[in-house]
Amino acid sequence: MREAVPVRTWQATLAQLAEPLSVPVQAPAQALPGRGGIGLKFQPRLAGDLAGVREYMRYYPWTCLDQQTSQAVALEDESRWQGITASLPAYLDRDGLAKYWPDLREGSDTLTAYMLAIANEAGYEIPEASRKRMLEGLKGFVDGRVVRDSALDTADLAVRKLAAMEALSRYPDTIVQAGWLDSFTLTPNLWPTSAVIDWAGILARSPQLPEQAERLREARGILRARLNFAGTVMGFSTERSDAWWWLMTGGDVNANRMILSTLEGGDWPAADLGRLMRGSLARQQKGHWNTTVANAWGVLATRRFSEKLESQPVNGNSQASLGEQRASQDWGKDPDGGSKLLAWPAGQQTLKLEHQGQGRPWVTISSLAALPLKEPFSAGYRITREISPIEQREAGVWHRGDVQRVRLTVDAQTDMGWVALLDPIPAGATILGTGLGGDSSILTGGEKRQGWVWPAYEERAYDSFRAYYRFVPKGQFTVEYTLRLNNEGTFNLPAARVEAMYAPELFGEMPLAVVDVRP
C-alpha cells in the first residue's frame, strides 16, 4: 500500500564547497513531524567520465564528414582526426567549402563552419592549406561572393552567416569586418538560440566591431533571459523553436555550447555553471545526447567545465552541521561521494557546510518533507484531472461496476528528460486496456493522447496509472485512461503527481477528492 502523505522533495539547490556555506533552514509549516529532513548529496564531479557518450560514439555507423569529425572530437582520438585532415582536400569544393561526401558537387557553409569551430575548441589542427581554403570559402559566403542555398525553403541566411562569422572569429588570420553585418538585420531577440550564442562569440572575440561592449552585454542578457532556472537544473524557454536540425543545431547542441560560452565569458557564479552543467546532463537519453554534434560539443563542454571548476581531485572531509547534528563525508573512504540526512530542527536554524582538504566538491541540498496537500502545487509542472462517465447507472453518483474516463493534463515549464506521471485509483478498481480476460477494447476505444510526448512505458497497476516519458518538452500534453470501479466504499486517495525523476524538485501535484462508490 502507498502512503497517503509520502515524503517528497520540495526544494533543492546545488552548491560547490569552495568556501564555507551557510543556509537557513526550517521545516514547512504543515509538515508531519518526525518525517523527512535535510538531504545532502555529495559529489566530487558533476559529469563523470561520460562512458555512455563514448560508447555511443565509438559504435556510431554513419561516415559522412560531420559524423567523422564529431566522432574524433567526442572520443578525443587524435589519430582519427589526423586521418580526417589527411583526406580533407578531397572533401573541399572549388570554393573551399567542405562537402559531406567527396563525390558531391558543392560543399556546405554549415559543415565548414562546424569543422572550423569545433577543431578550434578542441585544440585540433587543420593543415594550413586546407584551413586557408576553408576560411576563404566562409569569407566568400559571408561577403556574398559564394552562394549556397538552404537545405530547406526557409529564411535562414542570417543564421548561417552568423555561424560562419563565429567560426572565422576563432582564427587570428581572419578579422570579422563591420561591413559583414550590413547584409542582415541585427535582431538577436528574434534569432534562434544557436544564432545568439554565435553572436555572443563573435562579439567576445571582435573588440573592433562598433558598439561591441554594449551589444555583447545585450547578447549575454538575451541568453540569460532564455534560460529556465528550476531547482538544480536549467533549460531553454525557446526550446521548441530552436530545433534547426538542418543547420546541425538544436536544444542539446545549444545547451553544451552555452556552457562553453559562459566559461569563455568568465562572469558566472560556480553554482549557476553547475546548474547549467547538470541541466545539460539531464538532457541525455540512454547515457548520451541526441546527435553526434551534440555529443562532440558535450565532451568539450564537460572537459572545459572540469578544468575550470573541478581541476583538483577531492580528498579530506566535507562536514555539515545543523544545531547539534553532525554529518561528514570522508572522501578517502567514499571517493565517489554519498548521501546524508539531517532531521528537521525545531524552528529555524542554520545549516553549515565546509570542506577540509583539497578540491571543491559539489553538494545538493534538498528539503524533504511529508506535507499534506490541500490544493494543487506547481514547481515546474502543473497537473489537472477530469473525470467523465463511460458507463454510469445514475447521473452524478458512482456505483460498483461503473466505468469512468480519467483525463490528465500536464503543463511543463521547461524541457526535461525522464518524467514520470502517477495517478492513484480506488482500491479494487481495474484500469482497462491491459489485455487481460474480461477487459473491454470497446470501452477504451475513445482514449485520447495529445501533445509532443510518447510514453516509454506505461503501467496499469492495481493501485495507480503510471506513465514514463524519455523526454517532455516545454508545453502541454494530455493522456487518458479508462477505469472500472469494482468495490463499494469510501476511498481516500494520495495526490496525483508528475515528477522529473532525476530532478525530483521539479514536480506538480493535485489532491484528489474522496471517491464514494455505492453498491
Image: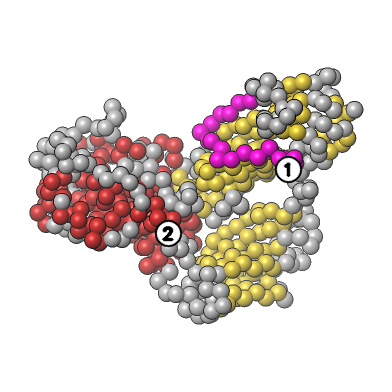
Secondary structure beneath label 1: loop
Counting from the top left corner in percent of width and height, residue 482 is at 70, 28
Magenta stretch encompasses residue 164: no
Counting from the top left corner in percent of width and height, residue 180 is at 18, 42
For mark 2, does the 10 Å Cα neighbourhood hold few (<14), some (14 to 19), or many (20 or more) residues?
some
Which amino acid, by three-letter code, is at mark 1? Ala
The answer to which image quadrant residue 344 occupies is bottom right
Counting from the top left corner in percent of width and height, residue 303 is at 37, 63
Furthest residue toward front: 437
- Label 2 sits on residue: 50
The answer to which image quadrant residue 243 occupies is top left
Count of all numbered marks drawn on residues in the image = 2
Give the residues in magenta: 447-465
The C terminus: image quadrant: top right
Magenta stretch encompasses residue 459: yes
**Viewer-proximal residue, 330 or 362?**
330
- Which residue is at 25% across, 61% downward? 78
The reply to whether residue 214 is in sight is: no
- Label 1 sits on residue: 495
